[in-house]
Every structure is written in C-alpha cells, then in structure tokens.
Amino acid sequence: MRSQKPHQEKTRSGSKTLVVLAGMPGAGKSLASTVAKQSGIPVFVSGDVVRLEAKKRGLEPTMNNLGRLMLEIRKKEGMGAVAKRLLPLIEETFSPVVVYEGARNIEEIDELKKHYTVFSVAIHASPRSRYRRLLRRKRHDQPNNWKQFLERDNRELKVGLGRVISLADRMIENEETKDQLKKQTRRVLKKIRE
C-alpha cells in the first residue's frame, strides 16, 4: 500500500478532493460508490458517460457496442476524454469531496489532477469472483460466457486500467461479504474527509 495522503495539485475552483475508484469489471466499484452516495458524496461513473454517448448515437448498450465506443471516444479525444467530459459535472457540485467511479487509465487521473486533489482507491477481486458477480447483475453489457469475460478484461487492460490499479493510493480487497467491502469503503472515505 502506498502513502494514504492525496496527491496535492492546484485546483481551479476551490479545494475539491476527488476520490477515484478503479477496478476490473465486477470488482465492487458500484457497491463502494453506493457507500459514498449514502454518505452524501456525489458520484460520477465513467460507464455512464459511455452509455450516454451510446444513447445519443442510438446504439444498443451491449458489451460489444459499449466496448467499441469506449475505445473510439478515447482514440478521437485522447485517453483522458472521459475525465474531460466529467469536469463540467464535477464543477457543478458544491461538495468538497466527489467520487469518480471507473477511471480506466493514468491519463484520466492526470487530467483530474490538473483541477483537483486526487486520491485513488483500487478495488480488487479474483477473476472467478468478478465473473460470478457480473453474471448476477443481469445488465445488457454482461458477458455471456468465460471467453467474453476474458475479452472484456483484456480490453480494459489495453486502455491502461492495470496501471491505474497498480499505482493506486489505497487497495481494498473484495473477496468477502458486501458488508465487509462497505465497511472498508467507509473507513477509507472517513480518512479522506478528515
């Protein structure tokens, strides 16, 4: 585990702290961000940005469509594109702490550091645990089999997610109960808010 002090950078408008939750699909990011929401912390999700773009284009939100669109957005607008698209939304919040769920690469983190104090938290779970969770979700973008699951993992790693996870300020292992993950997340958020 690296230092738990957030990266200090000059902020454009006040002193917001941005908590970046990163992890492979099914690791537990959504559950962790639910804890933040319950604590009154605004949460923005990278996948929502991609799903919104898919809706604008009239695309079905399938795993393949969203995956292709995620890569296309980053190819056309740069690797920090999703973070850039979130900046105006983050600026509208009055909360001193904001959560960004689902950063995929270091360029996004770097883009956010230009504007905010950033503290990154990686949530880790084994591939088998993550696969089971994804199947239980029953979302349009869930994998239908183990091969699709591995393809999705590889696509996520290609855009740089592995590096974000490995360089995180804090790592939470999510192999136990949902309550255990919630407890660990509350502890991390409390430290950040102090």
Image (cartoon, rainbow, N blue to C red):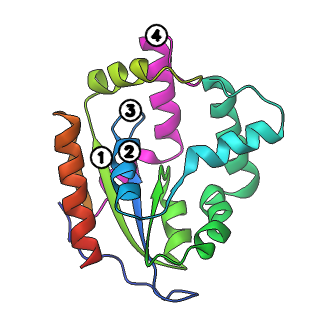
- What is the chief secondary structure element of the magenta stretch? helix
Residue that numbered label 1 is attached to: 123
Is the Cβ of the residue at disc 1 closer than 8 Å to that at disc 2? yes
Judging depth in this view, the residue of 85 and 193 nearest the camera is 193
Q: Quadrant of residue 120?
A: bottom left
Q: Residue at x 35, y 43 (%)?
A: 31
Judging depth in this view, the residue of 123 and 147 nearest the camera is 123
In the image, the segment drawn in magenta is 141-169
Magenta-drawn stretch contains 110 = no
Q: Earlier in the sequence, mark 3 or mark 1?
A: 3
Q: Is residue 55 above or below residue 64?
A: below
- Quadrant, the N terminus: bottom left
Residue 55 image point, x, y percent: 77, 37
**In the image, what residue type sits under mark 2?**
Lys
Could you classify mark 3 by the number of other residues whose Cα lies within 10 Å: few (under 14), some (14-19), or many (20 or more)? Answer: many
Residue that numbered label 2 is attached to: 29
Residue 106 lies left or right of residue 182; in this view the side is: right
Residue that numbered label 4 is attached to: 145
What count of labels does the image hold? 4
Q: Is residue 73 above or below residue 43?
A: above
**In the image, what residue type sits under mark 4?**
Asn
Q: Residue at x 45, y 30 (%)?
A: 153
Judging depth in this view, the residue of 25 and 158 nearest the camera is 25
